[in-house]
Amino acid sequence: MNIARIGLIGISGFGSIHLRSIEYLQGKMLDLKAVVAVNYEKNKDIINKLSLNGVKYFKDYRQMLNEMKDLDFVVISTPIHFHAQMAIDAIKQGFNVLLEKPPAVTIQDINAIIEAKRNYNKICAVDFQNTSGTAFRKLIEYIKSGKLGKIKTIIGVGCWKRDDSYYQRNNWAGKLVVNNNYVLDGTINNPLAHLLNNELIIAESSERGGGEPKEVISELYHGHRIEGEDTTCVKIVTTKGIEIYYYSTLCNMQEETPYIIIEAEEAKIYWNYDNKFLIKYFDGNEEVYDGGKEDLFVKIYENMIEHLFEGKELYCSVEITKNFVLASNGAFESSKKIFDIPSEFIEVNIKNGKKFTYIKNIREIIKYASENKKLFSETNIQWGKKTELFKLDNYNKFELFKN
Ligand SMILES: NC(=O)c1ccc[n+]([C@@H]2O[C@H](COP(=O)([O-])OP(=O)(O)OC[C@H]3O[C@@H](n4cnc5c(N)ncnc54)[C@H](O)[C@@H]3O)[C@@H](O)[C@H]2O)c1
């Protein structure tokens, strides 16, 4: 196997997870040649350590793109609102790209990345690492083979908790717009983006266009006092008539394993973030699969490199994530605003010096809504707000929230 020469843009924050994967594969599958960090002082220990191993440091990513022409690909792990511009710049300078999720915030930006990629004939993969687990790969194989029959409904549920420091860690967390750039940070675009993306990939694997959102109705709420959403329900109908439901919160009492339930013609399938699935066939047979503990981040790198050198299918190409961006934009268009959960339904707890915001009974509310395929406003909760269906025919520009 060839060794891929790579450059990494963004080394702190989530960049440290990239460095961990890179270190694991260094010399075996890849060779880190350059890193970019805007703040030298903050990162000087790691930069100095890398420099001793021959890794070049750049303050500006454009300089790296100008000077390191022989890289096989560049990795972009920077704030959400920089993804599209950096990916397009890299592609136009002749680089393949492994881009952090979400690939882009708006439909116009994802279209621009895909267009650049086509024009310059480059590879662009997205670091939606939950597409790389063995259980998910096997499930996709089963769906493509047709053995589960046509997919009718997909339901995704993710209930996590976050304390206030999560929203204070940088200048874009929990924001809709930063310096006139879209971020739309929240469950959909950030922590539980993987859940929605996997649902859409499942739908797209069943038939071409199966995961392409045609219409969306959604309700976006926040329990935390932030701009963005932290508690959401979305219903998507795709061009092939598959119904996709997505329920998320960061205001749960505990961290629970997100899961997806698929209703297909031949079986009901349960997949979860623990790399497991259970298939209950309607003929009475059952199949359980446990992929065990895997480093999904490393597996995304391996896939990128195997795609590059051996033509192996990409787990998550930028093209397939267009459905995700469409669904996300559709959700914001349908809800139009982020509704406050009134304070009588909120509980704030301080634990070990950390301040947590809970929405009362959110776990039960999501359980009931997801089991009955209802939006929150269709249940009997008092804070539910009705919204309007948004049709995505010929949709090509997101322009909410900027005055
Ligand atoms: N795949 C996952 O599960 C996962 C998990 C967490 C975060 N992420 C993603 O990782 C990305 C980074 O998140 P984060 O929390 O590390 O953000 P962050 O704000 O901490 O910034 C990350 C890095 O970007 C660098 N950066 C900022 N501006 C830059 C510029 N102009 N040029 C070059 N580098 C610049 C910073 O130096 C920093 O190293 C986001 O897209 C986020 O969605 C993915």
Image (cartoon, grey):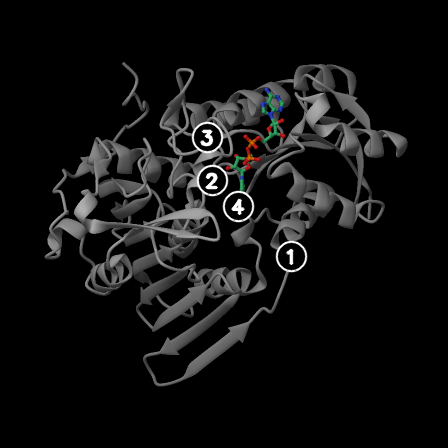
**What amino acid is labelled 3 in the image?**
Ala
Q: Amino acid at mark 1?
A: Asp
Residue 128 marker: 4
The answer to whether the residues at label 1 and label 3 have Cβ atoms under 8 Å apart is: no
Number of numbered discs visible in the structure rendering:
4
Q: Which residue is mark 3?
A: 104
| Amino acid at dot 4 | Phe
Mark 4 residue element: loop
Disc 2 from disc 1: Cα separation: 26 Å
Name the residue tied to disc 2: 165
Which of the two discs, 2 and 1, sits closer to the camera? 2
**Label 4 to label 2: alpha-carbon separation:** 24 Å
Q: Is mark 4 within 8 Å of ligand 1?
A: yes
In the rendered image, which residue does mark 1 sit on?
295
Horizontal placement of 154 versus 317: left or right? left
First of labels 1, 4 by sequence position? 4
